Image (spheres, rainbow, N blue to C red):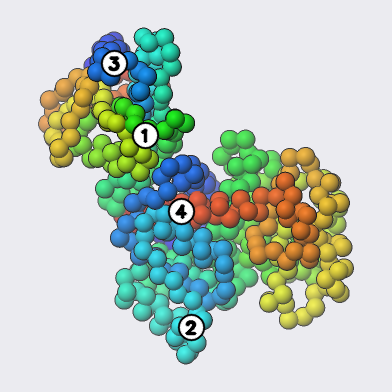
């Protein structure tokens, strides 16, 4: 693996290898070894054209635990606000000796553009490109599901996962559907028709408009954030109506299997797609997703950067 | 070395470890995956039988501390399992199959240093084939095998390879 651009590029074996590596790294960093020398001398650039809290911090923490040097770049407060192009920014970073670029961009395909270009010789990791993909988030979600529900299995065969909400604007949903399917899970997409993309019938997932009928069947339910910043039209009549039909609340929580877990990629709109009680309930693994994110991103950086380059 | 030779060597090493450390109370036996971990299991079992009580044992993966990571494709990580009591102030015995350049053991010493500060660190190996590149030596050796630098020494163990044998090619 040279880059991590999308889940569709990953083979089953590569996906399982990332999860296995993350599992060992989690064990190491839960234990006494907090800091590992593995990536000493490597330089990793966080190139963030869009706002992010957990993804950027998570990649930064992962890189630092492996002793890499991290340079943070955010579009705000940089020459991008003076009109610098992605190409010139990338050439600058290359001249500074970046071994890997972790890029988030509002344009779908930005990470691929960077990886295919001559602008940088390092590895490129897609940390979210427009409404296309967010592979590291999908990997940490599958890692979390595997840890809780696979009982030592390598993949997610036989498990059922519901992804609920704004599928249309969600790169997390797209990456998750591809990865969950690759790992053998059955995926339900639950959303109002206005929040489902064109061509959804070709996705490896079952579409439903009725959350209450799906909940009792699934082992994990993944709530998506309503992405107000990407919505120029009105996709549902009101926030109250949306949460009545598609929000996770106490009543719906009770319909889940006793072992089922509740997930959310963050940041949450509490009271909209998920109530505070559901987010803070004992079934919620939302905070754990964040710490698993560090292990999974350590695994990604290890597999991309530790070997011969 | 055949199966009986390996078994005798491990029994002797187990006795030597106990003799050197006056019993097993302060011992932690750590195997380096893959084959060192299996040898460590066997030694721990022998020591427990001899002393009539369990000895603390575990595994230590040194991949993340290797100095040759950049020379080849990334290696899969193996489990690291440190006993709950930790290694602080303990007499740690590292177990590996073959001692060659000494670089694995250097990496293991680094990995141990991240975990804690043992009272002593000792090294047990099934085969010492010479050609050290670092000032490292073994405390307990199953067999000294004089080899040519370009030969390869393979330790086969029933747990992974279906039979016990040491092969020089």
Report which residue position mark 4 lands on: A298
What chain does mark 3 sit on? B
Q: Secondary structure at mark 2?
A: loop
Viewer-nearest of discs 2 and 1: 1
**Which of the two labelled residues, at mark 3 and mark 1, occupies the earlier sequence position?**
3
Report which residue position mark 1 lands on: B88
Q: Which mark is residue A266?
A: none
Q: Position of residue A244 (x, y in %)?
A: 87, 63
Residue A108 vs B116, above or below: the answer is below
Disc 1: CA contacts within 10 A as few (<14), some (14-19) or many (>=20): some
Q: CA distance from mark 2 to mark 4?
A: 28 Å
Image quarter (top left, top right, bottom left or bottom right) of the C terminus of chain B: top left
Q: CA distance from mark 2 to mark 1?
A: 48 Å
Is A269 on the left or on the right of A151, as rendered? right
Q: Secondary structure at mark 4?
A: helix
Circles 2 and 4: CB atoms closer than 8 Å: no
Image quarter (top left, top right, bottom left or bottom right) of the N terminus of chain B: top left
Q: Is residue A206 visible?
A: no
Q: CA distance from mark 3 to mark 4?
A: 42 Å
Report which residue position mark 2 lands on: A77
Q: CA distance from mark 3 to mark 1?
A: 18 Å
Is A153 on the left or on the right of B23, as rendered? right
Residue B121 vs B70, above or below: the answer is above
Q: Secondary structure at mark 3?
A: loop
Q: Is residue A72 visible?
A: yes
Report which residue position mark 3 lands on: B22
Q: Secondary structure at mark 1?
A: loop
Q: Both on one chain, marks 2 and 4?
A: yes
């Amino acid at each position: 693996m040279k880059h991590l651009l999308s889940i569709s590029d990953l083979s089953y074996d590569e996906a399982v290898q990332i999860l296995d590596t993350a599992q060992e790294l989690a064990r190491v960093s839960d234990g006494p070894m907090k800091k590992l020398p593995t990536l000493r001398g490597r330089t990793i650039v966080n190139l963030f054209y869009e706002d992010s809290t957990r993804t950027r911090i998570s990649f930064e923490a992962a890189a630092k635990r492996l002793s890499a040097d991290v340079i943070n770049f955010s579009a705000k407060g940089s020459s991008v606000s003076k009109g610098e192009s992605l190409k010139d920014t990338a050439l600058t970073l290359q001249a500074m000796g970046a071994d890997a670029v972790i890029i988030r961009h509002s344009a779908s395909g930005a990470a691929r553009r960077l990886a295919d270009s001559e602008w940088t010789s390092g590895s490129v990791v897609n940390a979210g490109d427009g409404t296309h993909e967010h592979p590291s988030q999908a990997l940490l979600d599958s890692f979390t599901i595997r840890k809780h529900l696979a009982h030592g299995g390598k993949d997610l065969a036989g498990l059922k996962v519901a992804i609920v909400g704004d599928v249309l604007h969600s790169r997390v949903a797209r990456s998750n559907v591809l990865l969950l399917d690759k790992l053998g899970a059955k995926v339900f997409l639950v959303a109002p028709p206005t929040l489902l993309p064109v061509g959804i019938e070709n996705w490896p997932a079952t579409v439903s408009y009725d959350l209450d009928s799906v909940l009792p069947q699934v082992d994990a339910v993944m709530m998506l954030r309503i992405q107000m910043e990407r919505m120029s039209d009105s996709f549902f009549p009101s926030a109250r109506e949306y949460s009545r039909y598609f929000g996770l609340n106490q009543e719906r929580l009770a319909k889940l299997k006793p072992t089922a877990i509740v997930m959310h990629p963050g940041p949450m709109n509490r009271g909209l797609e998920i109530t505070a009680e559901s987010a803070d309930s004992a079934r919620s693994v939302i905070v754990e997703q964040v710490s698993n994110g560090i292990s999974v991103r350590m695994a990604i950086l290890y597999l991309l950067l530790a070997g011969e380059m | 070395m055949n199966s009986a030779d390996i078994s005798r060597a491990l029994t002797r090493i187990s006795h030597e470890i106990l003799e050197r450390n006056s019993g097993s109370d302060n011992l932690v036996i750590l195997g380096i995956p893959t084959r060192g971990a299996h040898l460590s299991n066997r030694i721990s079992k022998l020591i427990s039988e001899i002393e009539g009580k369990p000895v603390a044992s575990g595994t230590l993966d040194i991949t993340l501390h290797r100095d040759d990571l950049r020379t080849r494709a990334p290696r899969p990580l193996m489990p690291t399992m440190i006993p709950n009591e930790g290694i602080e102030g303990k007499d740690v015995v590292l177990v590996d199959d073959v001692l060659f350049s000494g670089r694995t053991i250097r990496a293991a010493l680094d990995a141990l240093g991240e975990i804690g500060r043992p009272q002593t660190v000792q090294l047990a190996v099934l085969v010492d084939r010479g050609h050290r590149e670092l000032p490292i030596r073994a405390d307990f050796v199953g067999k000294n095998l004089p080899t040519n630098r370009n030969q390869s020494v393979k330790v086969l163990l029933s747990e992974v390879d279906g039979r016990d044998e040491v092969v020089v090619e």
